[in-house]
């Protein structure tokens, strides 16, 4: 019987087939069970199997989940068809699937010998029977191996027992006297694998199998085994590629549920199905399988945030590039500070939605209305604290933030710090920044030196001060397992963000955005936009501001999308 390979990819095929193997079929297993592997979940909340080698990854997954297994299945590296069939067999009996690289560069084995890494894993697992499917590394030619189990497909039950070189049918494993694992070799065909098992595999598409050439009551070439109780405290994330076939099978053989991710996007936050699986799972531990996970920044935070199930306005846990934000700017209750304060919160929410609505037909992205609330307002007087900045009480802002969250509106808190620093003011709003729909904006125009006052000059900030804020906000987001946060850097002159190239853009917890605040005639605004893009940090998002009164003229939504390039990720109205 030829194995069927579908266009959905081998890994997906393995998942479909192996999941079905864990269910009951029309034919029952043999009445006596001789062996069950011992499994245990990983100690750490996150275990990453990031080995590039198929063999190394298969061994690492076995080490993570299996304490002992007298039987192991081995398949050849670089042969996804053989591995897919071996995966179904390994899950059926609840044992690890290991991959043999065979003799070659980087291998310690000569032709017909077992690589040292595999030998060590056989020893750790206390293996007595190695079931070689597809004959990796020439296992069938090793001293101490049995006659080929493939002959069982064409012989009687008695012949199959004799050819297997053991008494597995009556419960004996017939271990070699020298302790070397006995080798059982099968061709990579379903017919021969079923002959070695002594029962029929379930169909690859999940339908119940039929006895075929071997039924569950005939002699088997391997000891009778059944899967151990499932490890229901662990969920596996695996990259959807042939390189993970063996590791996925080993995880499922241990009773671990597996959620696939695209190899090009190993961040679970970027995958709605992965977020749903992690949030809906009662597990507390995660096994990440795939080389790309090894280089995924802050993977632990991404998984913990996904497990919360918290989503941003507009959906998901990441801000860009899938969202287009349209914001109203100002201070609640203060019309002179911007359009946001010209109405109460309910009317402001409706206005934000109305302003955002035309953009929905101009982009393929999800359009999200937003408030940019000036939380600390630049002041002409020093005030009691002497910092020339009036800090609004967080309790005054909370009703606006809660109402915005309920209506799918994102919120950014804008800081105009005067003579104090941005981090000091940001910390005053920590309780609000711990909410999933709240980000932060830094406005250097209003950052004063110790001897300066507002409106006498345009302020500026050094990268070291910006980096202190981003490090703190990233750590807060990570610690609280929050979705990604927007961090806005306002700028209309190069001097506002001094040594901009030194600003740390590496925190995955933050989506960094430079907001061009130029006003006036459109040619001047476009010149500012182009100047700010020169030598800009790679990967930064961009914001554009439309001024109702100061622009000449103000662009409408169609003009903003068509005339500003690249198209801004955030358009703010003031």
Image (cartoon, rainbow, N blue to C red):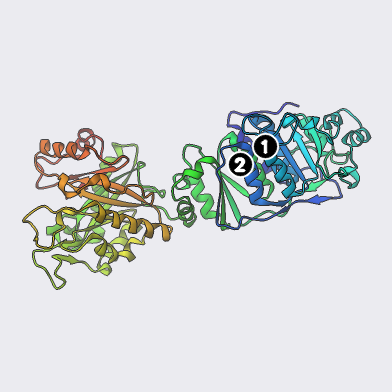
Q: Is residue 54 above or below residue 342?
A: above
Question: Residue at point 60% right, 38% down?
Answer: 244
Q: Residue 221: give its label.
A: none
Label 1: which secondary element: strand
Q: Earlier in the sequence, mark 1 or mark 2?
A: 2
Residue 355 percent coordinates (x, y): 23, 47
| Structural crowding at the residue carrying mark 1, measured as other residues with C-alpha within 10 Å and reported as few (<14), some (14–19) or many (≥20) | many
- Identified at 72% across, 46% down, the residue is 23
Residue 158 location, x and y as percent? 94, 35
- Figure quadrant of residue 76: top right
**Numbered badge on residue 57:** 2
Q: Residue at x 51, y 50 (%)?
A: 276
> Is 164 displayed left or right of 309 in the figure?
right
C-alpha span from label 1 to label 2? 9 Å
Q: Is residue 332 above or below residue 111?
A: below
Q: Residues within 10 Å of mark 2 (few under 14, many from 20)?
A: many
For label 1, the residue is 99
Percent position (x, y) of residue 253? 69, 46
């Amino acid at each position: 019987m030829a194995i069927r390979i579908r266009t959905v990819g081998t890994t997906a095929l393995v998942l479909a087939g192996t999941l079905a193997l864990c269910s009951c079929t029309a034919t029952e297993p043999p009445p006596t069970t001789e062996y069950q592997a011992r499994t245990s979940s990983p100690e750490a909340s996150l275990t990453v199997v990031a080995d590039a080698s198929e063999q190394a990854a298969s061994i690492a997954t076995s080490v993570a989940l299996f304490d002992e297994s007298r039987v192991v299945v081995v398949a050849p590296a670089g042969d996804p068809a053989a591995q897919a069939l071996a995966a179904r067999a390994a899950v059926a009996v609840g044992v690890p699937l290991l991959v043999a690289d065979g003799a070659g560069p980087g291998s310690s084995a000569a032709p017909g010998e077992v690589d040292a890494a595999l030998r060590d894993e056989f020893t750790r697992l206390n293996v007595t029977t190695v079931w070689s499917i597809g004959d990796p590394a020439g296992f069938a030619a090793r001293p101490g191996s049995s006659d080929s189990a493939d002959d069982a497909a064409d012989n009687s039950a008695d012949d199959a027992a004799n050819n297997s070189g053991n008494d597995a049918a009556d419960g004996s494993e017939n271990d070699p006297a020298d302790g070397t694992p006995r080798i059982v070799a099968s061709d990579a065909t379903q017919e021969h694998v079923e002959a070695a098992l002594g029962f029929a595999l379930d169909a690859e598409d999940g339908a119940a199998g039929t006895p075929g050439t071997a039924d569950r009551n005939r002699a088997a070439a391997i000891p009778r085994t059944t899967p151990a109780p499932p490890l229901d405290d662990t969920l596996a994330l695996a990259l959807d590629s042939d390189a993970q076939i063996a590791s996925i099978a080993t995880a499922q053989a241990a009773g671990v549920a597996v959620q696939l991710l695209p190899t090009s996007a190993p961040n679970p936050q970027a995958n709605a199905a992965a977020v749903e699986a992690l949030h809906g799972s009662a597990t507390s531990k995660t096994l990440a399988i795939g080389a790309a996970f090894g280089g995924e920044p802050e993977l632990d935070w991404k998984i913990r945030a996904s497990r919360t199930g918290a989503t941003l306005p507009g959906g998901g846990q990441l801000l860009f590039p899938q969202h287009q934000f349209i914001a109203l700017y100002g201070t609640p209750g203060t019309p002179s500070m911007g359009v946001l304060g010209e109405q109460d919160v309910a009317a402001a929410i409706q206005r934000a939605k109305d302003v955002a609505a035309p953009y929905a037909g101009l982009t393929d992205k999800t359009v999200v209305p937003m408030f940019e609330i000036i939380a600390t307002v630049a002041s002409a007087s020093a005030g009691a604290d002497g910092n020339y900045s009036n800090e609004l009480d967080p309790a005054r802002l909370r009703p606006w933030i809660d109402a915005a969250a309920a209506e799918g509106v994102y919120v950014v808190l804008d800081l105009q710090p005067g003579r104090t620093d941005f981090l000091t003011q940001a910390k005053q709003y920590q309780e609000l920044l711990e909410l999933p729909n709240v980000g932060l904006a830094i406005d250097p125009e209003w950052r004063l030196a110790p001897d300066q006052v507002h409106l006498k000059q345009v302020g500026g900030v050094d990268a070291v001060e910006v980096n202190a804020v981003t490090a703190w906000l990233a750590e807060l987001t990570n610690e609280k397992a929050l979705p990604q946060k927007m961090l806005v850097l306002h700028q209309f002159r190069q001097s506002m963000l001094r040594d901009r190239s030194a600003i740390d853009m590496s925190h995955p917890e933050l989506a960094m955005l430079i907001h061009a605040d130029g006003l006036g005639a459109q040619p001047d605004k476009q010149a500012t936009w182009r100047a700010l893009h020169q030598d800009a940090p790679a990967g930064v998002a961009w914001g554009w501001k439309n001024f109702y009164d100061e622009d000449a003229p103000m662009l409408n939504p169609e003009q903003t999308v068509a005339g500003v390039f690249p198209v801004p990720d955030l358009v703010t109205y003031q």
